[in-house]
Amino acid sequence: MAALNIEAVYTAPQGNRSFQHPISLDPTSDTATTKKTHLAALQSLVPRLQDEINAFLTERMEDEKKAQGRVISEEEAKEEENYGEEVVEEDA
């Protein structure tokens, strides 16, 4: 059984970072079941890879803010907390 990797590489002047997960693959089998299993593994690993990259990038952003001595405003902190979510403002 061979192993392939799903991989993403972050490259920056400060350094590189590689994110990868192995995917098992039987090169002797070319059945529909094998292909479905392979695709299912990809479907489960891609979101994990995205989560790891997002966590890494968020950490880098926080480190850069600290290095600049920048203080986050209350509004910016609230926006970051709700990033990617729909926020409905209530009228008072």
Image (cartoon, rainbow, N blue to C red):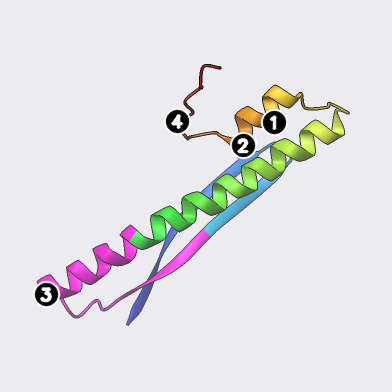
Q: Which residue is drawn at 34% across and 77% down?
A: 2
Seen in the picture, residue 1 relative to 52 is either above or below; the reply is below
Q: Is residue 15 magenta?
A: no
Give the residue number, with chain letter if any, for mark 3: 31
Question: Which numbered dot is residue 53?
Answer: none
Within 10 Å of disc 1 (Cα), the crowding (few <14, some 14-19, many 20+) is few
Q: Is residue 25 magenta?
A: yes
Left/right of residue 43 with respect to residue 75 in the rendered view: left
Task: List the single residue furthest toward the right.
Answer: 69
| Element under disc 3 | loop
Q: Give the range drawn in magenta.
A: 20-43
Q: What amino acid type should be assigned to the residue bearing mark 2?
A: Glu
Within 10 Å of disc 2 (Cα), the crowding (few <14, some 14-19, many 20+) is few
Which one is earlier in the sequence, the residue at label 3 or at label 4?
3
Task: List the single residue furthest toward the top.
Answer: 91
Q: Distance between the residues labelled 2 and 1?
A: 6 Å
Question: Which numbered dot is residue 77?
Answer: 1
Task: List the single residue furthest toward the front.
Answer: 92
Q: How far apart are marks 1 and 3 (CA)?
A: 50 Å
Q: Do the residues labelled 2 and 1 touch (CB within 8 Å)?
A: yes
Image quarter in which the N terminus is found = bottom left
